[in-house]
Image: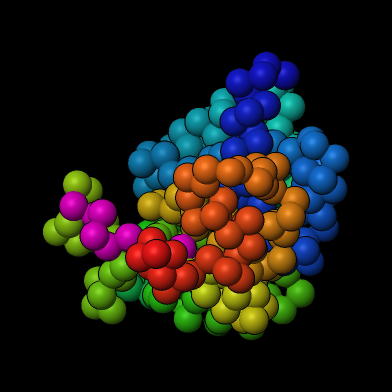
Amino acid sequence: MAAATRQAGYIAAILKCVATGKISTIHTGRELLENGHPIVAENLSLTWMYEPDSPSAKDRVRKRFDEQLAIQVSAGVEFIMGETFCWLGEALIAVERAKKTGLPVMVTICFENENRTAEGKADAARELVDAGADIVGMNCPRPPEHMLGPLQPMRKAVPNAFIAAQPVAHRTPKDKPDFTSLPQFPFELDPLQLSRKEKAAYAQRAKDDGINYIGACCGSVASHIREMARVLGRLPAEQRPWTLNYEKPMSAYEYYDHDPTQVSAENVVQKAAK
Ligand SMILES: [Zn+2]
């Protein structure tokens, strides 16, 4: 596999494989990561071609997914992710086509401003699991505050299945939880970005809620993922490759010898004042 593809896979693994450790497929990914070999995930997403009452439109979606899967599987992907499906019907087609590869399949739906799919269904988890998905859940376009609640009925509906959460990192109001429905979308979202501590708190709550696959979607950046990984016990500070003891520190972490318990806004301000 080309180096660029491998690197893309590594980034995908870091962004997507922040799991609690209950998922067998992610166990494999973790083992691979610990041995320097990341799991390589591929992605299917909404096609904008799905029409709920059109068999021919559904066949076009099948054909598009099959084309994408053929290319990605030939490149050696190890895990298939289908996400951002507002239509449960399109998500079910993604499961149907992805399962034919024989690889582990995760398919997540998205609720926009209502707690339902575009068809009006709130029980998406059961149908996705019955279709054969190994991991089901939600991603985009809501932040954790408005995703973890609606995930609870899904958690209860499929108690033996693995549940995924991949919320965005933009703060939204209760009456407009979909960040793409805000007037700030897409060019004024910066002030709405969640802090890394808020994303870490989300990761902890998701774990406490029984979410097995804890990830992130739009607006999430490296500092979010690092703090999520840290709170989940997945990235011990001493294992970070850049923990050098510089004599001329350029960051708070360097100043405090990479001890996260010492790095606080108060300490940084006090040191700067001396
Ligand atoms: Zn997203």
Residue 80 placement, left or right of 25:
left
Q: Nearer the viewer, residue 205 or 165?
A: 205
Q: What count of labels does the image hold?
A: 0
Residue 36 placement, left or right of 82:
right
Q: Position of residue 31 (x, y in %)?
A: 84, 48
Could you say which quadrant of the image residue 110 lies in?
A: bottom left
- Which residue occupies 59% across, 38% down? 11
Tell me if residue 168 can be seen: yes
Tell me if residue 195 can be seen: no
Magenta residue span: 188-196
Q: Position of residue 157 (x, y in %)?
A: 63, 79
Q: Nearer the viewer, residue 78 or 169?
A: 169
- Which residue occupies 72% across, 79% down? 159
The question of residue 195 being in magenta is answered with: yes
The question of residue 14 being in magenta is answered with: no
Where the C terminus falls, by quadrant?
bottom left
Where the N terminus falls, by quadrant?
top right
Query: Image height check: is 151 above or below 4?
Result: below
Q: Nearer the viewer, residue 72 or 131?
A: 72
